[in-house]
Image (cartoon, rainbow, N blue to C red):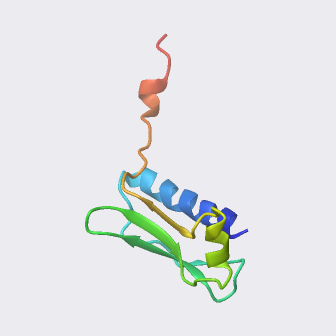
Amino acid sequence: MLDLELTQKILQVKALAAKTGKWPSSVPEMKSSICPGAKWLYRVAPDGTMSLSFSEKPKWLEERLKYKGLPFTYSDKTPPQLKNRASTRPKR
């Protein structure tokens, strides 16, 4: 369930970035609905890389990673761009 929540947070941040063409400098607090008291931390590094990570390290995370589970961290350097809708319309 945390994987799904992370995916939802990634999509939220990418939607914000698509509006401006760059990663937002900050986002509204992203509390976890799965783990009360925990939240997703958003950062933009000086090199422009955006990252999202879980505020806590669950006890079971090390075991999960042994079996090739995904960590609760995501990073991306290239913000999404909105496509120019006018240029994608067929000419008449």
Q: Is residue 66 above or below residue 83?
A: below
Locate residue 48: give its quadrant.
bottom left
Q: Is residue 1 above or below residue 38?
A: above
Residue 75 x/y as whole percent: 44, 62
- As rendered, which of 20 and 5 lies closer to the eye? 5
Q: At 49% across and 22% down in the image, what residue appears?
A: 89
Say whether residue 88 is left or right of residue 57: left
- As rendered, which of 28 and 78 lies closer to the eye? 78
Q: Residue furthest bottom?
A: 37
Q: Residue furthest left?
A: 46
Residue 45 x/y as whole percent: 31, 69
Q: At 51% across and 73% down in the image, what residue appears?
A: 53
Q: At 60% across and 63% down in the image, what residue appears?
A: 70
Q: At 43% across and 48% down in the image, what residue appears?
A: 80
Q: How many marks?
A: 0
Say whether residue 66 is left or right of residue 20: right
Residue 9 x/y as whole percent: 58, 65
Q: Is residue 24 above or below residue 54?
A: above
Say whether residue 11 is left or right of residue 26: right
Q: Residue furthest front?
A: 66
Q: Is residue 86 above or below residue 79?
A: above
- As rendered, which of 69 and 67 lies closer to the eye? 67
The N terminus lies in quadrant: bottom right
Say whether residue 25 is left or right of residue 28: left
Residue 19 x/y as whole percent: 43, 52
Locate residue 34: give its quadrant.
bottom right
